[in-house]
Amino acid sequence: MKKINLFLTAVLYILVSQTHAQTVYYNADQFPLIGKTSNETETRYERLPAYLKERCRPPVWNLGKNTSGLAIRFRTNSTAISAKWEVTGDNRMNHMTETGIKGVDLYAWEEGHWQPVKAGLPSGKVNERTIISNMTPQEREYMMFLPLYDGVASLSIGIDSTAYMKNPELPYPDTTHPLLVYGTSITQGGCASRPGMSYTNILARRLNREVINLGFSGNGQLDYEIAELMATRRDASLFILDFIPNVNAAQLTGKTRPFFDILRKANPDTPVLFVETVIFPHSFYDKSIYGTITEKNRLLREEYEKIKREGDKNVYYLASDGLIGSDGEATVDGIHLTDLGFLRFADKLYDAIYRINNK
């Protein structure tokens, strides 16, 4: 009898374990996606509308296929959450983690803020990963940030077979008046260790507002087609322009004002924030680099002050002072930011946004 009881206990344990281990996947296409300028894209998981394919420069179009700033919202009472995702490029770089490039990053809404849960670590082009398990079976609202430097061909989210998965109930982040951020590789998220740590995604969580990322690595060159796209968002609460590292002095003086005028013509009252480039730490030693970036910052300030003198009361400026601290420890390669750099940058932007909103 004792042996039979032990056998039945073992069988029951195996059956219970198998039940708990079962995962059901749901296509993420059925859940809200935030961070897009338009839903008129070639595929769901990309940043630029399809009409720009024949109009903008090919590098900009291709980078628009990267999913930086996009996030899926959902709620579930599952004790475990998994993800299956396929990226389009299986990209790799020597100065950025693969999790930041092509991983996913899960957050949960806890007591009035977005709490990091855990990132889904990629293994290649096709990925499947249990992100978190052994949670209490209570309903939570989640946000999953998508890769910063790769595209997403497909995405499914896995939960317990006995749990439910539904659309979010909380209206967070608020999508009614998004911030649009235009810029460079730093804006796109280079080189955050995981997607949630890019400065636009940090701001989205802190402000609890949709932040649309229009950072194009090496290609934030004041393309007027992007200004025209941004200008279509008449509901924008703020335009942030952070492009200096990708333009030379001639481009800066020749294209900043026309780019701004495109935004202003369609959005006469929307605040516009110009952001200087960070003072790259290695420029402490490389005096040529120091001269170049400080000169471009000076030229940007001249453009800003000219606009102010003409009477525009909704234009603002964020200087480079302390943007990433002064200890030189906030970059990977002297230029692109670590998580520490992104946190410091986001702090400065958050303060500037607060001042704009409370002027």
Image (spheres, rainbow, N blue to C red):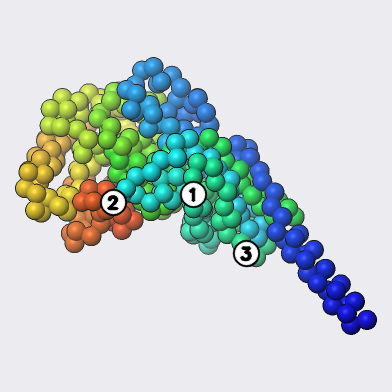
Relative placement, left or right, of 256 versus 341 is left
**Amino acid at circle 2:** Leu
Instruction: Tell me the distance, in whole angstroms, between the alpha carbons under discs 2 and 3.
Output: 33 Å
Amino acid beneath label 3:
Met
Mark 1: few, some, or many residues within 10 Å (few <14, many ≥20)? many
Q: Label 2's element?
A: loop
Which numbered disc, 1 or 3, marks the residue closer to the eye? Answer: 1
Query: What residue is shown with label 1?
Result: 122
Q: Position of residue 312 (x, y in %)?
A: 22, 32
Nearer the camera: disc 1 or disc 2: 1
Quickly name the residue at label 3.
135
- Is 27 located above or below residue 333 in the figure? above
Q: Is residue 355 above or below residue 218?
A: below
Work out which residue is located at the far front of the displayed protein and give it. 3
Of helix, strand and loop, which one carries label 1? loop
The kind of residue tagged 1 is: Pro
Between residue 95 and residue 322, name the one nearer to us: 95
Which residue has dot 2 on it?
A: 337
